[in-house]
Amino acid sequence: MWEQDQKRNIEKLPIDVQDTIKRCEENGTTDSEEFQEAIKVFNKEFVCRTELDSNWLKAGSPYRSREVYVIMWGPSEFTVKGNLKTFDCTDRLKEITCPTLYTCGRFDEATPETTAYYCRLTPGSKFHVFENSAHLPYLEEPEAYLKVMRDWLLSYN
């Protein structure tokens, strides 16, 4: 479902960006500057719609591993080629027994439609869409995010 959502998201981008992403994936040049520039456009639309503090990003960089990401997912966000390609535990969501809150942003790469679908498969779960966010509502709408989290956690107090 992730790949399908990303294909639809890519179609919402300017045609030149779409072409670049497609061409670089097909040619195996996802490490090129051209691809990275296209990813910036995608990320601005579907990952974080606000400017991020570069110091904050730099501080987190030691905790990310491109090598692990490529092994597990693949060289591109849009097409799974790593060892998670055949992993799918969707049919096990019905087994979750603890309180569960699914969240996403209105413009999220984890689309509201798919996130709602997973919520429907999880007994007693809740679902919230942050209307002014992409994938990082805790940065894009921090006050709303904290309120939703606080209210949800207090509902189990």
Image (tube, helix red, strand yellow):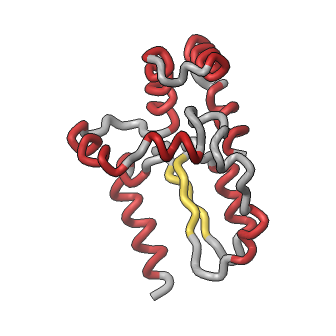
Name the residue rendered at 66%, 35% in the picture: 79
The number of numbered badges drawn on the structure is 0
Q: Residue 81 in the image: state x and y as whole percent.
A: 66, 38
Nearer the observer, 26 or 132: 26
Q: Residue furthest top?
A: 16
Q: Residue 111 in the image: state x and y as whole percent.
A: 63, 46
**Left or right for 44, reference 139:** right
Nearer the observer, 135 or 26: 26
Q: Residue 133 in the image: state x and y as whole percent.
A: 46, 45
Determine whether 52 is above or below 10 in the image: below
Name the residue rendered at 49%, 46% in the picture: 68
Q: Residue 75 in the image: state x and y as whole percent.
A: 56, 33
Name the residue rendered at 58%, 22% in the picture: 13
**Left or right for 110, reference 36:** right
Determine whether 39 is above or below 150 in the image: above
Name the residue rendered at 78%, 65% in the picture: 91
Nearer the observer, 138 or 65: 65
